[in-house]
Structure formats: C-alpha cells, structure tokens
Amino acid sequence: MLTLWGPGGKGRYCDGMSRRSFIQVGGLAMGGLSLPQMFAAGARGDSALDARKSVIMIYLTGGLAHQDTVDPKPDAPEGVRGEFKPIATSLPGVFLSELMPRTAAIMDKVAIIRSLVGQVDEHSSFQSMTGFPMGISQREGRPHFGSIVSKIQGPVNPVVPPFVDLAPVMQHRPYNTPGPGMAGTSHKGAKMEGDDLALLKPPADMAPDRFAGRRDLLGRFDAFRNSVDGSAVEGMGSCYKQAFDVLTSDALAKALDVEREDPTLRARYGIGSPKHLGDGGPMWNDQFLIARRLVEAGARCVTLSYGFWDTHGNNFNHLRNVMPLFDQGVSALVQDLHARGLDRDCTLVVWGEFGRTPKINAQAGRDHWAPVNSAILAGGGMKVGQVIGSTDKIGAHAAARPVHFRDVLATVYHNLGLDPHAVLHDKGNRPVNILPPENEPIAELI
C-alpha cells in the first residue's frame, strides 16, 4: 500500500500518517471507484465519465415549520397562523413568509412543493437521503442516494469523487449521513475534511527531493503485488502511476477553497459559521458555495446538513434569527447556478424530515408533524416558477395534489439520467428496486 503524506499528530505512524489515512491511500476510494479503477474506466472509455448531471441536496435538520416559511396561512385562526405576514413573490398570486424576501424575488427560478406526504415522525436524515425510514434503511441495507449514483454512474472527473458529503458529525446521531448499504463501502460519501483533505495535497514543508523519493516508491509495487491476489492488480501499474499524479494535483483542494472565489460573490452567499446549532447542523453558507464549486469540478452528488429547525419552543424568535441567512444562502445558490449555466444540469433540493404542527404550543413552538411537509427545488432543467400542491386552511394535510416524498428522489434520479426503479442486489444477491414501482418523477417538474 502506497503511503504518501499526511498531517502530523497524535496516534500517527512514523511517517506522519494517521491509521485512517494509511488505509485509504492504497485505493483512495473517495466515495466511489478507487483512483486506479477510475483511470481504468477512463481508459475503457466508459460513458459514465462523460455525463455532467449533478445534484445538491440541503437537508434541514429537525424539520422546518412550513406554515412560517413557504406555506403561510394568514387566514388561519389564532393559535395556528403564527406571527409572520405573507409577502408577494415574482409569481403573481404566490406568497411566501416575510422571512423569505430574497427567495420571493426569484420565485420564477424555483418550484415549491407544499403537499409532501408519506413521511413518518422520525428525527433522521434517512427519509430524505435513502427514501426510507431509518429502521427499514438499516435492516434492508438501503443506500444513501449519492452512493447509488456513485455505484451506477461512477465519476465524471477521475480527480473528483462522484459523491461528496459535506455534513459534519452531529450530536443527534440519526441526523448524520446514512451509509452506502448494499451499494458497498467504496461508494460511501467522501468526507472532505481532516485527513481526507490532507491527502489531496503535499505538506507545504515537503522538500522536492523528499517528494521525488516517494515517487520512486512506485517502482516497488512488486512486493505489494506478491502479497495479494495477483489478479487484483494485474495491469494496473500505469493506472497507479496516474493515481499518484492525481495525488500531486491540488485540483480538488482548489474546488473546496472558497477563498479563491470573488469576495463579493462569497458575501452574497452569506458565509455563515461552522458552529453547530443545537444538536443539528451548522448554518454554514460557505458550504453552499463549495457545493456549487464541487459540481463544477465534476462531483455528481453533494449533500450537506443545515441549521436546526426542531422548534418545539421559541419557534418565532428562532426563525427571526436564522431565516435571513437561510434565505440569503438559498437564493444566492439558485442565482449562481443560473449565472454559471448550471441550472440545466444541476438539481437543487432543500427539505427536511417532516413539517411542524399547525397548533402553536404553550412554549410558542410547533411540534413534529409528519402528515404534510414542503420542499424547495430548482435547476435540473425542471419546469420551475410554480407551486405544486396545497394544504388545507391550517396547513395540516394535503388538500390538492399530494406528492409522496419518494417522488422527489425519483425526480432527482430522473434528472441525473437514472432509472429510479433500477435494480440493485443486496448482500444475499437478491434484486431490489432503488425505489418502489409506484414512486415516479413529479410530472409537473419534467
């Protein structure tokens, strides 16, 4: 196994590599094919390397109050309607909460689903990311949708993982990103932080002659080949050399470096902070910009967790404090995708695990509400500038055009050029559809 470099520190091998990095470098399986496999695929001319469709999914940890944001109910009775007024949007007759003026101004570039159904009362990312509740996902090995994309389509650019997960580790464990399940560990989302990021570029203090010496290690693969099944590495010599060349490149590190962006654009996104809110995610708007940079660099799927929306108490003051940054970041991302010509190819999905109760509780909060939820979508060549579905007068149930939450994922797969009913095989080699046959792409969007 080829050990290249790594940050120094406690719990590391004599050359400065952590055990985790040491294990990874041999294959550098960054959320998909290992680098040698990527190059082998490229040498074969696999069509998967040519497509440029992508998705950015922003998961709102905790469940956003739909009545106070994208589905205002000004005519609801006292104790239900909340404290915020509706405002007009760029679409005649469509209103959003006064907390979302920037999104209201670009309503012609987004689609809002107000009638999501089918979710269960569960504080986890599994429904949004796999299409199934946590228990089913774990029992059946249902993969994160990014892992499925990685497995079926592979990389666009051999330097860039097909699936990057920007979500940090959160205190409430079910919020954290689901695993690759039956897709296999090599299709786990790449975590571009810590040791993973350090692997992408040599330390600044590494002397050229020392680096050249490590390149000479490529000539010592015979010992490695003799220690494993020869068929596993047969014919891979040139691919490993290319893999080494990728590791000397800082292309991916550059994509992750928002300091390279125009400061004016970065400020338009809102920057935010890596500090967690509650037991959920941070409101780190830089990650919105990083996600855009990653899909431009070739990532197919980028996911992140954002904010804390479990407002059992103090719902209205909390939203007053946090919604301006949310509104700024989402609207900036939508506009940036359009400005850079990515709106045809990159799908944006913003949603959480459920809605909030119509009735305001004694702590001025809203509790969990699974019967109906909302989502914001943009890009992907979809027919945006519309609202799909509606809820009753108190926002409790879908009144028109109920949309199953798995249909959102079916739409994502469709936009990526994948069949949402394609077959995977579980650990017992039994065929399993990605999504059930009844879940289809949302017709109004395509």
Image (tube, rainbow, N blue to C red):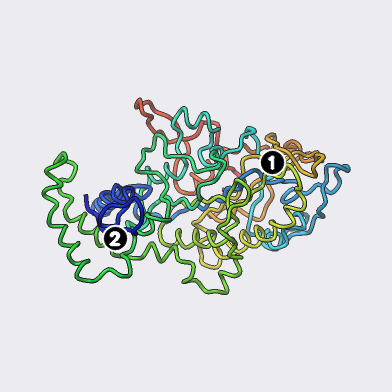
Left-right relation of 250 to 73: left
Estimate the x, y position of residue 29 in percent, counting from the top left.
32, 48
Label 1 sits on what residue type? Gly
Q: Secondary structure at mark 2?
A: helix
**Residue 326 sits in which quadrant?**
bottom right
The single residue placed furthest to the right in the displayed view is 78
Q: Nearer the viewer, residue 255 or 101?
A: 255
Q: How many marks?
A: 2
Estimate the x, y position of residue 178 in percent, counting from the top left.
48, 40
Dot 1 alpha-carbon crowd within 10 angstroms: few under 14, some 14 to 19, many 20 or more: many
Estimate the x, y position of residue 379 in percent, counting from the top left.
56, 56
Q: Residue at x 55, y 58 (%)?
A: 274
Q: CA distance from mark 1 to mark 2?
A: 44 Å
- In the rendered structure, find residue 24 and report the number of the disc placed on it: none
Q: Residue at x 31, y 52 (%)?
A: 12
Residue at label 1?
355
Estimate the x, y position of residue 4 in percent, counting from the top left.
25, 58
Left-right relation of 290 to 254: right
Dot 2 alpha-carbon crowd within 10 angstroms: few under 14, some 14 to 19, many 20 or more: many
Q: Nearer the viewer, mark 1 or mark 2?
A: 2
Residue at label 2?
247
Label 2 sits on what residue type? Leu
Left-right relation of 114 to 85: left
Q: Residue at x 39, y 54 (%)?
A: 51
Rendered view: 25 above or below 80: below
Left-right relation of 333 to 97: left
